[in-house]
Image (spheres, rainbow, N blue to C red):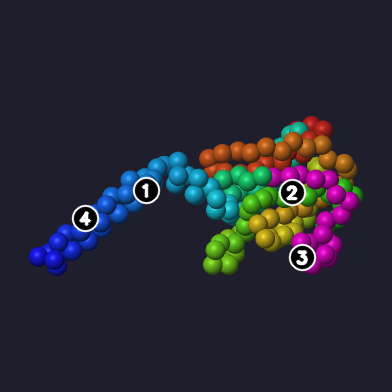
């Protein structure tokens, strides 16, 4: 009888503990999943450009979401990590920094398939380079012959960051 009674008490205690644990568990919702997906850094997969009648456009394509982007005029472009100067011709430069972002996946494989360094022959935009993919930052540089007047914005479906650089009408 004592063993049977002891077994009943153990089973009852186990049931109480399990019931208490499940009552405090929160079900996973779509909101929870979206928040979790958003904590992963977006991947920078390409950069491209185009000329239009009154502006040149630089576009950075992303997988995931558009992170925080800062556009900063700088006197020269420097590769992240090495401190070496980026060999783009120009008198004026913009640094475009995305955070958090990565140009590589979790396995360390490069996912960025755009140009690393290229001269461009548009009315304003004269060159572009990917100058860093380091510790959650992806950085690009853009070169110009004259001081750029620009507008930065995001586009969705697919996710991308765009930079329009104004110039006098050419068409």
Give whichever of discs 2 and 1 has the lower sequence position.
1
Q: In screen coordinates, is 43 left or right of 69?
A: left
Q: In terms of depth relative to the viewer, which is nearer, 22 or 52?
A: 22
Residue 81 is tagged as 3
Residue 124 x, y percent position in the rendering: 81, 43
Distance between the alpha carbons at the discs numbered 3 and 4: 61 Å
Give whichever of discs 3 and 2 has the lower sequence position.
3
Residue at label 2? 96
Locate residue 14: give its quadrant: bottom left
* Comparing labels 4 and 2, the label whose residue is closer to the camera: 4
- Asked if residue 162 shows in the view, the reply is yes
Residue 153 x, y percent position in the rendering: 67, 37
Most frequent secondary structure within the magenta stretch: loop
Distance between the alpha carbons at the discs numbered 2 and 1: 43 Å
Answer above or below: position of 106 versus 165: below
Distance between the alpha carbons at the discs numbered 1 and 4: 20 Å
Q: Residue at x 79, y 32 (%)?
A: 169
Residue at label 1? 25
Q: In terms of depth relative to the viewer, which is nearer, 2 or 62?
A: 2
């Amino acid at each position: 009888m004592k063993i049977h009674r002891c077994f009943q008490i153990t089973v009852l205690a186990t049931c109480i503990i399990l019931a208490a644990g499940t009552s405090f568990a929160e079900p996973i919702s779509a909101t929870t999943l979206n928040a979790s997906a958003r904590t992963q850094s977006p991947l920078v997969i390409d950069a491209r450009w185009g000329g239009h009648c009154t502006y040149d456009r630089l576009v950075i394509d992303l997988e995931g979401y558009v992170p925080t982007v800062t556009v900063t005029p700088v006197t020269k472009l420097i590769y992240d990590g090495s401190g070496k100067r980026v060999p783009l011709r120009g008198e004026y430069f913009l640094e475009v920094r995305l955070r958090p972002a990565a140009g590589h996946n979790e396995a360390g494989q490069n996912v960025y398939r755009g140009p690393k360094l290229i001269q461009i022959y548009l009315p304003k935009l004269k060159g572009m380079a990917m100058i860093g993919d380091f510790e959650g930052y992806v950085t690009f540089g853009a070169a110009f012959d004259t001081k750029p007047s620009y507008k930065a914005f995001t586009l969705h479906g697919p996710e991308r960051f765009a930079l329009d650089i104004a110039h006098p009408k050419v068409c």
